[in-house]
Amino acid sequence: MEGVGIPKELIPSVCPYCAVGCGFYLEVEKGRATGLEYMPEHPTGEGGLCPKGNAVLEVLNHEERLRYPLKRNGDEWIRISWEEALDLVAKGLSKAVQEHGGRSLGFLASSRCNNEENYALQKMARLLGSPNVDNCARLCHSPTVVGLGGALGTGAMTNNIRDLENSRCILAIGTNLAEAHPVVSRWIHKAKDNGAKIIVVDPRITHTSWMADLHLRLKPGTDIDLLRGMMKAAIEEGSIDRSFIADRTNGFEDLKRSLEGFTVEKAAELTGLSAGEIIKAARLYSRSEASALLYSMGITQHICGTDNVRACTDLALICGQIGRPGAGIWPMRGQNNVQGTCDMGAMVEFYPGYKRASDPSSVDLFKTSWGAPSLPEGQGMTSTEMMDAALEGQIRAMYVIGEDPVICDPNTSKTQKALESLDFLVVQEIFLTATAKLADIVLPAAAWAEKDGSYTSMERRIQWIDKAVPAPEEAKEGLSIICEIARRLGHDLNYTSASEVLEEINQTVPAYRGATRSRISNPGGLPWPCPAEDHPGTEILHVGGFSTPDGRANLAVVENVPPAEVPSPEYPILLTTGRIVVHYNSGSMTRRSPSLMERDPELYVEVNPEDASSLKIADGSMVVVSTLRGGTRAKARLTNAVKPGMVFMPFHYHGANLITSDARDPVSKIPEYKAAACNIVPAE
Ligand code: SF4
């Protein structure tokens, strides 16, 4: 009998969805992943997985996986050999370089791919003379990288996730973590069991707000007003930490002065909350023994996203709620390896290890390390700027790995036009995504379980996983594809394995120096900074000093900036977008997962029953939601989760970003997904 006597292997792995980085075992039989086993020894998930994690095999073994290189021929795809595909990619990229220079190339790295692939991609981009290499952090947490980095010296989560159980107050602002990062909820429940008070700041009623002792349903786009109100209350009541401010921060007098003409009552008027609620929140947060501040895209995806992050940081710093067990700032980041992709320098502001691209000494360092006579200096174009530049003819060719800007970027029609206007587009993917459908060449890539490499979760945890199963048919590991293309373009990256890339990362990224393959192969790996091979890794940052040049944190004076679009007679309703538990990002994976699709199969819009009644919209009926950029069809869900005058759409389906705003934060360049003025009518 076939299969009898063949042992099943259990191979440790890490979830390919969100940045919580839960571990599990893949059950492998005859070269095929056939099941999952939980990993109770994993320090973050402790064996827990959310619905997405539980359904990963539906995607890994999906019949629509890309299996062969494809070449566009009009509206058709032709299967071609790898040799031909790689030659055509090299030709397309080198033509742009020869005719328009290296800066005419744009690269989108992938926060779903491992550190080694992203390191190799940014290196190839820069060796080709292009500073334009970016990743999807631009769309979710670029304000964290620059805002938290500017304040504390490190733009990353300060404590680990399980440390939340030590918090006595948890302030979750602009994050629906119960849906977006479900496994984190277990640590919040543990904190609650230990007596912690939970404050949730969100205009909507969400699964996260159900956990709250205090739910502040502020007006969208008034986070800074609330945070300033809380700071004002804490200063007036004397519950700030004066010795922490004196010993460890810069800029308090300026911050205090900026609040002189401001009152809690003013904050209440601006936010739509009561002064009592703001004072209560300030007391709970500032007076607790250890307070955690968690935020996500409700804070970052605004035109004042960086200032929002700075205001969160100001509050934590003046209350001394940072650098201790249970006290710190937890940016809840999106994709499984978005932290690592930024660490690897696949971001226009930075070379690997956050060495500033605008600093000639950083560039010199990599010239020496990579043996490169010249490398681009200065900041390149961000992912969203590359789209503008493509429309203007400055970007001529793009290499997109594991990202789907057609679905993920705001203002879909513009993104689509931008990609269509390129001379050459190559997409390396596991499925034929909306973006891949616009490519000249599509390269089939191995998924996470089909290759070796490391991933860095949002708590800075670097985890290595070994290849568990082969990629389908001719799909190849991303690293070998990048190396083959680079070689054809005259740059032999000289890597024969992901381990070799990690060894180079150990040398060029100081925080990863001690994160050798053997040390990060255990369940849970190691959290960076891990500066030496005998260093245990760092669970809590900023314990004795901040990683700024003078060791002190920088407070900032910030004031609220209203959303770029406010409701008008023509577009009287505010549209906001966000995540839901069963889907992930562009949905290119989860929308192919039958068990997840069964739960939430289509785009919907949450509408308050009061608005629905005046707009003559019935629950479950189809509506058209329109903004200045066009309209999209969605199913109406009538719910008091949104207040009158506001609607909510999950962004995982094609359609949501057809209508979102592409106004950007001037500092981090993140688009303002969280606020667009819209109108709604019943669909014909
Ligand atoms: Fe995967 Fe995130 Fe769910 Fe954990 S919480 S199982 S990492 S999607």
Image (tube, grey):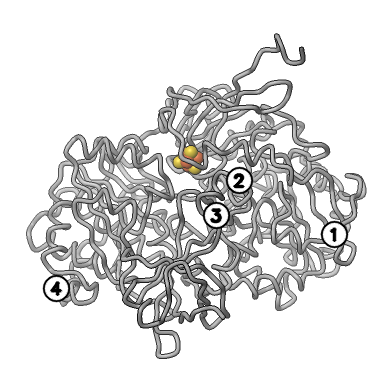
* Residue corresponding to mark 1: 94
Which three-letter amino acid code belongs to the residue tagged 4?
Thr
* Residue corresponding to mark 4: 263
* Residue corresponding to mark 2: 593
What distance separates the C-alpha of mark 3 from that of mark 4? 39 Å
Nearer the N terminus, badge 2 or badge 1? 1
User: Looking at the image, is mark 3 or mark 4 nearer the viewer?
Assistant: 3
The answer to the question of whether label 1 and label 3 lie on touching residues, with beta carbons closer than 8 A, is no
What distance separates the C-alpha of mark 1 from that of mark 3? 32 Å
Looking at the picture, how far across and down is residue 85, in whole percent? Answer: 88, 50
What distance separates the C-alpha of mark 2 from that of mark 1? 38 Å
Q: Residue at x 28, y 54 (%)?
A: 209
* Residue 563 marker: none
The answer to the question of whether label 3 and label 2 lie on touching residues, with beta carbons closer than 8 A, is no
Residue 403, above or below 636: above
* Residue corresponding to mark 3: 585
The answer to the question of whether label 3 and label 4 lie on touching residues, with beta carbons closer than 8 A, is no
Q: Residue at x 88, y 57 (%)?
A: 91
Nearer the N terminus, badge 3 or badge 2? 3
Nearer the N terminus, badge 4 or badge 2? 4
User: Looking at the image, is mark 4 or mark 1 nearer the viewer?
Assistant: 4
Quarter of the image with the N terminus in it:
top right
Is residue 331 rendered to the left or right of residue 255? right
Looking at the picture, how far across and down is residue 210, in whole percent? Answer: 27, 51
Nearer the N terminus, badge 1 or badge 3? 1
Which three-letter amino acid code belongs to the residue tagged 3?
Asn
Q: Residue at x 21, y 35 (%)?
A: 193
